[in-house]
Image: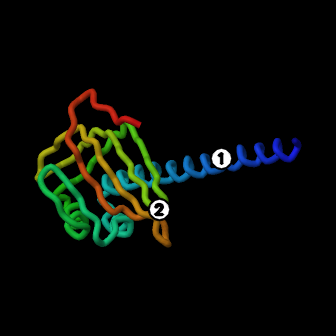
Amino acid sequence: MRASILGLFVLMVSVQSASAQQTSVEQEIIDLSREKWRWMSEQNADTLATLFHDQARFVHMSGTWGTDEEIDIIRSGRIHYKQADVHEVVVEVFDDTAILWNRITLLAVVRGNEVSNPFTVTEVYKERENGWQLLAMTFSSVRSGHSIEP
């Protein structure tokens, strides 16, 4: 009987530990995404180049392109991501892959015009030897009142 109770206790502790690990990975991705927004607002292209996978894809309202083009856009200021106000975040982790959904209001300067738009931004990360790398980022235009289902 004691062995059964002890076994059940060990199982419960293991499940809680696994849940805490999942939560810490989710928080790590949330923190990384927030840092990414800061680096984008600061036009820190060199740091972003290490975060973005060489073959990452970026989907915007005006087109789809790869890492080199995104870095060039940020470096040149063709799009200046001035501020991303993050309203809601949901993260799902699948082994070494994490998907993050942000509901944001983005203040940006695009071709010299300051614009503010609500988006749901989907970010896909893969864990590599040196940490997480961004594989894809998609900006989806949304209406006010939109929320992300957990």
Q: Residue furthest front?
A: 1
Left/right of residue 57 with respect to residue 29 in the rendered view: left
Q: Residue at x 62, y 50 (%)?
A: 18
Give me the C-alpha separation between circle 1 and circle 2.
19 Å
The image shows a total of numbered marks equal to 2
Q: Residue furthest right?
A: 2
Secondary element under disc 2, as helix, strand or loop, is loop
Q: Residue at x 33, y 63 (%)?
A: 135
Q: Please state the horizontal and vertical placement of residue 12, each as a whole percent of the image.
A: 71, 43
Secondary element under disc 1, as helix, strand or loop, is helix
Quadrant of residue 49 in the image? Answer: bottom left
Q: Earlier in the sequence, mark 1 or mark 2?
A: 1
Q: Nearer the viewer, mark 1 or mark 2?
A: 1
Q: Please state the horizontal and vertical placement of residue 38, each as a whole percent of the image.
A: 37, 52
Disc on res. 15: 1
Quadrant that contains the C terminus:
top left
The kind of residue on which mark 1 rests is: Val
Q: Residue at x 66, y 45 (%)?
A: 16
Q: Residue at x 39, y 52 (%)?
A: 99
Dot 1 crowding, Cα within 10 Å, few <14, some 14–19, many 20+: few
Instruction: Name the foreground residue: 148 vs 131.
Output: 148
Disc on res. 96: 2
